[in-house]
Image: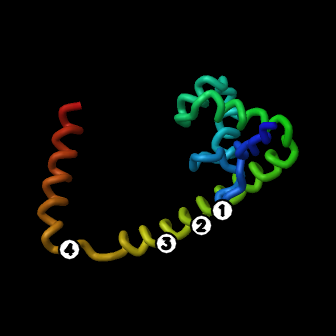
Amino acid sequence: MVAASKQEPKIIRTERGLTIAGTRITLYDVMDYLKAQYPPKLIREKLGLNDEQINSALAYIETHQTEVEAEYQECLQTAVEIRQYWEERNREHFAKISAMPPKSDQEALRAKLQAWKARIEAQS
């Protein structure tokens, strides 16, 4: 009598969320392409997956659609919050930089740049 071998899971939960086993690719990565209406073959190519991996991902998404969609929306919201945080932080950082007086060695470079811009505008 042959014992049935336990099949390894194709989709696992990691610190990144629902992930295709053996990869760093999440189902949310796949969802991005599905939402953009990419065909499965192109998603497979873009993400460097094999047929079994993409088929497992698509089957899991279809079977657990509500759960995956809810987690996907959380990921999108988190991405928006992170982007807003860094945009605000960079805005403050760039404002500080632009308020600083130019360094003396940069004045000559700025003058050359302004002359170059004026020459290009005159040729237009």
Q: Earlier in the sequence, mark 2 or mark 4?
A: 2
Residue 3 percent coordinates (x, y): 79, 41
Give me the C-alpha separation between circle 4 and circle 3.
20 Å
Are there few (<14), some (14-19), or many (20+) residues within 10 Å of tag 1? few
In this figure, which residue is indicated by the disc labeled 3? 92
Label count reads 4
Q: Nearer the viewer, residue 101 or 79?
A: 79
Q: Amino acid at mark 2?
A: Tyr
- Residue at 80% from the left image edge and 46% from the top image edge: 68
In this figure, which residue is indicated by the disc labeled 1? 15
Q: Earlier in the sequence, mark 2 or mark 1?
A: 1
Residue 112 percent coordinates (x, y): 13, 54
Give me the C-alpha separation between circle 1 and circle 4.
45 Å
Q: Secondary structure at mark 2?
A: helix
Residue 114 percent coordinates (x, y): 20, 52
Q: Nearer the viewer, residue 28 or 114?
A: 28
Give me the C-alpha separation between circle 2 and circle 1.
22 Å
Q: Amino acid at mark 3?
A: Glu
| Residue found farthest to the front | 1
Contact (CB < 8 A) between labels 4 and 3? Answer: no
Nearest-to-viewer mark from 1 and 3? 1
Q: Secondary structure at mark 4?
A: loop
Q: Amino acid at mark 4?
A: Lys
- Residue at 75% from the left image edge and 49% from the top image edge: 72
Marker disc for residue 76: none
State which quarter of the image contains the N terminus: top right
In this figure, which residue is indicated by the disc labeled 2? 85
Marker disc for residue 103: 4
Q: Earlier in the sequence, mark 4 or mark 3?
A: 3
Are there few (<14), some (14-19), or many (20+) residues within 10 Å of tag 2? few
Q: Amino acid at mark 1?
A: Glu
Residue 122 percent coordinates (x, y): 19, 37
